[in-house]
Amino acid sequence: MTDRSGAITWTRPASASTVGRFCLYLQVGFVGGMALLVVVLGATALVLSVVDGAYEQFALLALLLLIGGPFSLLYVLPLIEDETARSSVRTWASHTGYDRLRPLPAAVSVLAGAIAIVGSVAVSPVTPFVLFLVVLFGTVVGMQPLTSHGEIDPKAGTVCVNDQSFELKELAAVRGYRVPAVEVVVLRLSYATKTRGVTAPGYVTLPRDVYEEARPVLEAAASETERTTRGSRTERVLLAVFGVGVLVVAVGAAFLGFKRGGDALVILSYVALLMGCFGVGFLALAVRKP
């Protein structure tokens, strides 16, 4: 979308895609399931303490509930009552897409997560930790390509993508790949820009209407960079040198393998094939158009 200043801005949370929503529900189910189990176990322990007459144990549990850590009432209640904290939570939920999840599927996810955690404990004490790594870290990695936000300002000549900024004149090439509902845009900065330490994400996922609006600006900037720089001669020479050098190593490995024979032939043939692929790749990058 274009704001009043003429800049093209967008925000695409993970919840905008089916895969992203699935990952969010997995996170909510696992974390919410853990919280549900803690609440159930705590309440059960309190009730059993009263029933058994273990009032010392009841007092200890009540004390832990009041001041026993980051999830105790001493910590939670001020966060709930503080408007600034609630506003920060709402902003975070809106930015990450959790506010777009529906209550019923989220509740089902929490219940399923609690059941899965209990079942994993029954399998092995280590299984919940493995489940934690797979669900949380796996979903974070899975949602990374699906989430993007940024701004393209043609007047100022600047681009900001996922908090990484660079100038339009530093953009050497741009290419879009159409996938369902979005456009995956590959960005490549000029070699001279990269030597100055300026970085940009290798690709960004844009809503299709935003891409169609930003495409003329990005392609015009890349074309201007191509006319003024025609690629970096140093970059191409280095890639060509690496490519030829690796191919020489591949030929030498193949020759040595045929000379020795036996197991060395198999191993060195594999090395030669691998080095040959790298060499061809370097040479292809050296002759490619930006």
Image: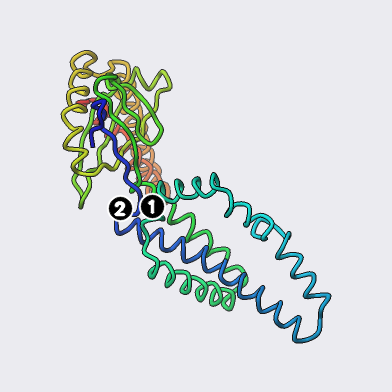
CA distance separating discs 1 and 2: 8 Å
Q: Which mark is residue 97?
A: 1
Which residue lies under the disc numbered 2?
A: 16
Q: Position of residue 183 (x, y in %)?
A: 22, 43
Q: Residue at x 18, y 42 (%)?
A: 209
**Residue farthest to the right, as pictured:** 56
Work out whether 162 lies above or below 123.
above
Task: Check if mark 1's residue and mark 2's residue have beta carbons within 8 Å.
Answer: yes
Pick the residue in front: 106 or 205. Answer: 106
* Rendered image quadrant of residue 19: bottom left
What amino acid does circle 1 point to? Answer: Gly
Mark 1 lies on a secondary structure that is: loop
Q: Residue at x 35, y 24 (%)?
A: 166
Pick the residue in front: 216 or 103. Answer: 103
Q: Which mark is residue 11?
A: none
User: Image check: 49 left or right of 30?
Assistant: right
Q: Position of residue 157 (x, y in %)?
A: 28, 20
Q: Quadrant of the N terminus?
A: top left
- Circle 1 packing at 10 Å, graded few (<14), some (14-19), many (20+), is some
- Which sits earlier in the primary sequence, circle 1 or circle 2? 2
Work out whether 146 lies above or below 123.
above
Q: Position of residue 264 (x, y in %)?
A: 42, 47
Q: Quadrant of the C terminus?
A: top left
User: Image check: 160 left or right of 132?
Assistant: left
* Rendered image quadrant of residue 207: top left
